[in-house]
Image (spheres, coloured by chain):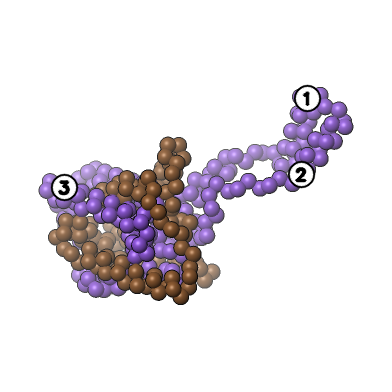
Amino acid sequence: MKDTLGTVAVGLLFGFCLHRIGFGSWDEVHKMFTFASLRLLLGFGGAVALLALGFALIAKLQHPKWAPRPIHKGTIPGGILFGVGWALCGACPSIALVQLGDGQWLSLLSLAGIVLGNALYAPIHARWLRFDSGTCAND
Amino acid sequence: MTYWPLWLCALALAGVALIHWLLLGRMFAVSGRFTALTDALRLRKKDSDSQTSLSQEELMEALRAATLAEFGLSEEQAATLDAELHVPVQPAPPLLPKPKQSAAVHLLFFVAIALGAALSAHLAGAHSDRALFFATFGHHPLALGTVLFGGGLLVGFGTRMAGGCTSGHGLCGVSRFQPGSLLATVSFFGAGILTSLLLGALR
């Protein structure tokens, strides 16, 4: 129960923050990718820097068992497909939900695409690819 | 609408990822939740497909009778067969590691993200800007639908193939200097930059 409530609380906070940051705006994402505005790019970089400090501290205090994230055959092609898709629809996975909350109902199509693309990958991977893609779901 | 300044963006993104770990004991990774959710749907369907109308006992009884008939076994040999059949069977290992959170909780997380964004839009009295979006792709519903659905397909497929997205690789993986995350992040930012520059040139 605590886990469920905590998950909902983090989701609410995350959705609120993403909307205020501007990640739910196709225009802002486009300006980030074309360097027309450095706000999101540097904001993201700043977050990574803060997290590097935070996670280093957590690693020292808690000694957590974090799954390593090695390079595999899907790292580059998967990343490229994701990047092209993100630039087109303006949504990385959580952003489609932010856009829906913002009232962008057309983003239902992006969300449907994300769910379908994710589901389609599994049988294609099992049939033809068969490398360890190390999904975050195991963390 | 007016967005947060750079420093607040950095603080908020880092804060959410850290709170996710400290509160839930899990690394913050949104595409992983999509994977867990679609797997739960796919595998539940597969499980129900493979279920037969016979109970376990009825099935074993039928198999035993068929085996005896096929090989013409004596009662003595049948007793040996019975002993073998009653050896406790090792349960088959599951196809995938059992997800730590249920599909319902993943779904709740997604609904919460949308509600959080709706709250932000309501309090700000403003929505995310999309003028450039319409300037780039026009207003025809078919064109917009193709871009959004096609883009979404690439995002869903690509994030699962790369094993993570902006949260799991970009924020949490890069900040822990994980080689796979660094390479994935360079790949998706690079592809995003090239695609967007191309879209801008064509506009």
Q: Quadrant of residue A69?
A: bottom left
Circle 3: element type: helix
- Can you tell which mark lies on residue B87? 2
Circle 1: element type: helix
Residue B32 at x, y percent in the picture = 42, 55
Along the horizontal axis of the image, is B34 left or right of B124? Answer: right
The disc numbered 3 marks a residue on which chain? Answer: B
Which amino acid, by three-letter code, is at mark 3?
Answer: Leu
Residue B107 at x, y percent in the picture = 45, 58
Circle 2: element type: loop
| Chain B color in figure | purple
Q: From this viewpoint, is residue A56 visible?
A: yes
Few, some or many C-alpha atoms within 10 Å of disc 3 (few <14, some 14-19, many ≥20)? Answer: few
Work out whether mark 1 precedes mark 3 in sequence or the reverse, and give the earlier one: 1
Few, some or many C-alpha atoms within 10 Å of disc 2 (few <14, some 14-19, many ≥20)? Answer: few
Distance in Å between CA atoms under marks 2 and 1: 21 Å
Placement of B87 over or under A16, stated as above or below = above
Residue at the image point whose x is 14% and y is 60% from the top: A36
Q: Which residue is mark 3?
A: B198
In the picture, which chain is brown?
A
The disc numbered 1 marks a residue on which chain? Answer: B
Q: Which residue is mark 1?
A: B71
The disc numbered 2 marks a residue on which chain? Answer: B
